[in-house]
């Protein structure tokens, strides 16, 4: 199993980075300073690289890129602007789900806009009382003729207030446990629902929202998959989702490391660059080591996902280590910058804030630990 990028992947990485440096990076500081929600016109720029269509098969309108190459793009996008990364990858995941699980009618109805990045999507699973235990979904879906009436509240939904279409998980009347949860494609222009943005610590330019459904009428034809099969569908993509998050964390860690190396070389104290100080070198060496380890774990898991090899343990390893280690890397980057690291004059304080959320996304660090424990010991700590 190799960990070096292929020539094609290196070309994708270099070209995508050059594009981001020219088209995206110049926007970041002003948007983040003013906490402006980035517009769909900015997201649309990524269609030059067919970002949303990357993992979708050609017969469904995509480009059928391999998963590792896609992850290389995720890392670069996170390195450039995490707020944009979280919206773009969420919408791309939506495209993959609809392309693989949707009916011909659903694909025709939703995919063109999403694939072209003229529209964006979101996933609405988490609720005020439902987090790690996804089988406890409380949102209700009651069949009424040729529609389902959805009632309930979703929270902490990435891009929820911007989304044109949401995959909403709801419990069909009479269904219990995981088997009672179904998935629905809910279009805002067809089945309007209320949204409210939630203030948060980082990724200020990507909205995190609460969605409220009050007998929201959704065409029965918009049910995604079989009735009662929603949660199984959601859990099916967890390995790729966790690897995706690992590369997102990796991009932020790499950005923090790059910034720290540059600052240490330029900043002088006691008549010489602080890069010559032993303890500064120690901090940067430890940062670099953690970034390297995270990349190796993430690349291994990405290759396994690409080959469709079962990798629950490896995906959780990559997600757990990358997110927790990059929290340490971004925190150390602030220390390397000294007092300036605490200010908004330098980006490292933002890297830390943007990174912190990823220890909870796609399953918290504690959930990953229990998954790995189950894989190693063969005994589940879950109820």
Image (cartoon, rainbow, N blue to C red):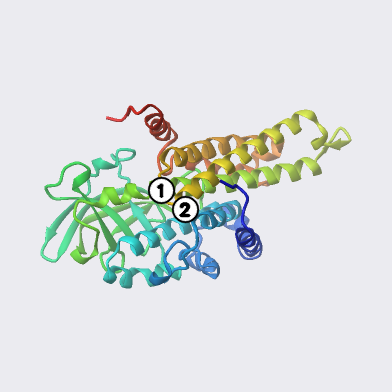
**Residue neighbourhood size for the residue with mark 2, other residues' Cα within 10 Å, grouped as few (<14), some (14–19), many (≥20):** some
Can residue 14 be spotted in the picture? yes
- Residue where numbered disc 1 is placed: 198
Say whether residue 62 is left or right of residue 176.
right
**Looking at the picture, does residue 321 appear above or below residue 38?**
above
- Find residue 47 and report its horizontal and vertical position in percent: 51, 69
Which one is nearer the viewer's eye here, 54 or 149? 54
Residue closest to the far front: 1
Say whether residue 226 is left or right of residue 256.
left
**Looking at the picture, does residue 59 appear above or below residue 148?**
below
Q: Which mark's residue is nearer the viewer, 1 or 2?
A: 2
Give SS at disc 2: helix
Which quarter of the rendering shows the C terminus? Answer: top left
- Find residue 380 and report its horizontal and vertical position in percent: 32, 29
Which of the two labelled residues, at mark 1 and mark 2, occupies the earlier sequence position? 1
- Find residue 78 and report its horizontal and vertical position in percent: 56, 52
Q: Residue at x 24, y 58 (%)?
A: 225
Q: In whole angstroms, how far apart are the C-alphas of marks 1 and 2?
A: 35 Å
**Looking at the picture, does residue 54 appear above or below residue 312?**
below
Residue 306 is marked as 2
């Amino acid at each position: 199993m190799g960990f070096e990028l292929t020539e094609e992947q290196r070309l994708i990485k270099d070209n995508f980075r050059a594009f981001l440096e020219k088209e995206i990076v110049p926007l970041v500081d002003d948007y983040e300073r003013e906490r402006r929600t980035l517009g769909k016109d900015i997201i649309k720029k990524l269609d030059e690289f067919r970002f949303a269509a990357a993992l979708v098969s050609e017969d469904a309108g995509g480009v059928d890129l391999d998963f590792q190459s896609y992850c290389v793009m995720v890392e670069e996008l996170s390195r450039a602007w995490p707020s944009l990364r979280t919206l773009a990858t969420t919408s791309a995941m939506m495209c993959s789900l609809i392309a693989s699980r949707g009916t011909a009618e659903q694909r025709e109805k939703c995919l063109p806009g999403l694939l072209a990045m003229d529209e964006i999507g979101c996933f609405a699973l988490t609720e005020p009382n439902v987090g790690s235990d996804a089988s406890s979904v409380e949102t209700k879906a009651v069949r009424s003729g040729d529609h389902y009436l959805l009632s309930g509240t979703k929270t902490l939904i990435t891009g929820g207030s911007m989304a044109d279409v949401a995959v909403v998980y709801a419990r069909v009347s009479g269904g219990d446990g995981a088997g009672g949860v179904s998935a629905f494609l809910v279009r805002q222009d067809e089945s309007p629902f209320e949204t409210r943005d939630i203030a948060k610590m980082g990724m200020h330019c990507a909205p995190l929202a609460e969605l409220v459904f009050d007998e929201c009428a959704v065409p029965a034809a918009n049910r995604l998959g079989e009735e009662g099969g929603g949660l199984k569908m959601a859990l099916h993509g967890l390995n790729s989702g966790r690897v995706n998050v690992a590369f997102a964390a990796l991009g932020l860690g790499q950005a923090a490391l790059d910034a720290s190396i540059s600052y240490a070389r330029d900043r002088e104290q006691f008549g010489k660059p602080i890069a010559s100080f032993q303890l500064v070198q120690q901090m940067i060496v430890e940062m670099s080591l953690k970034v390297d380890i995270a990349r190796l774990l993430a690349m291994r898991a990405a290759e396994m996902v690409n080959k469709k090899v079962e990798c629950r343990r490896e995906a959780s390893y990559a997600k757990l280590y990358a997110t927790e280690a990059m929290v340490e890397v971004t925190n150390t980057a602030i220390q390397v910058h000294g007092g300036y690291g605490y200010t908004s004059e330098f980006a490292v304080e933002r890297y830390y804030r943007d990174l912190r959320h990823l220890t909870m996304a796609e399953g918290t660090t504690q959930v990953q630990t229990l998954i790995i424990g189950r894989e190693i010991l063969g005994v589940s700590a879950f109820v």
